[in-house]
Image (cartoon, rainbow, N blue to C red):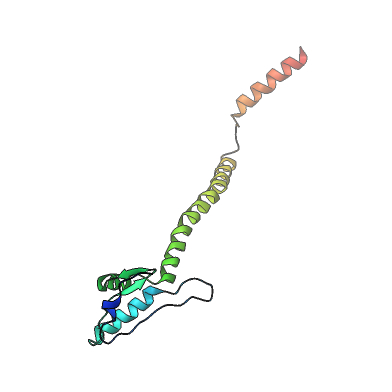
Amino acid sequence: MNLEIEELLVGPTAIAFTGTRPDGSSGDPVSIAKALTNFAKDHEDLIIKGGVLEGALLSTEEITALSKIAPREELLARLAGGMAAPLREFASLLNAIPQNFAYALSALIEAGGAGTGTDEATEAVSDDEATEAVA
């Protein structure tokens, strides 16, 4: 890293950094920025001069903007919820197909079945079959 951070180290200086989590992922810079920004609001002696994140130099404004981002866990929960909603809708749609078929079948049974005509039409077919059998 070839960063020009000498000007940030003039005068009283504190350095905060994140380590590596047990799962191997990097720490949460948002929570550190949030904690320092909130602490600086109540303690005017703390002045945030800048920072370094993933090899890039951050200004005070960028650190303040970083502190306003939701925590990692909340962002992951939002992402999971956003991905789950379409899947729930799709599962509901797939469930509706057999359900609608069952409703239609039930309505058909209540109406007397499919393709049933009047008694006269049934008798006419029976007479035709009887005539063919005689011939």
Instruction: Tell me: residue 49, above or below residue 110.
Output: below
Q: In which quarter of the image is residue 65?
A: bottom left
Q: Which of 2 and 116 is in front in this view?
A: 2
Closer to us: 30 or 104: 30
Give the residue at x 69% y 23%.
126
Left or right: where does residue 35 sit relative to residue 104?
left
As drawn, the residue found furthest toward the right would be 134
Query: Going by the picture, which residue comes out furthest to the top?
Result: 135
Quadrant where the N terminus lies?
bottom left
Task: Identify which residue, 26 or 43, lies in the foreground.
Answer: 26
Q: Which residue is drawn at 54% across and 49% down?
A: 94
Residue 39 picture quarter: bottom left
Tell which of 83 and 54 is nearer to you: 54
State left or right for residue 38 relative to residue 94: left
Give the percent coordinates (x, y) of residue 105.
58, 43
State the image quarter where residue 51 is shown.
bottom left
> Is the residue 27 above or below the residue 14 in the image?
above
Identify the residue at the far left of this view: 44
Give the total number of marks visible in the rendering.
Answer: 0
Where does the C terminus fall, quadrant-wise?
top right
Residue 2 pos. (x, y %):
36, 69
Name the spot of residue 85 as percent of width and height, x first: 46, 57
Image location (x, y in percent) of residue 102: 58, 46
Above or below: residue 117 compared with residue 57: above
Q: Would you say 118 lies left or right of 72 here?
A: right
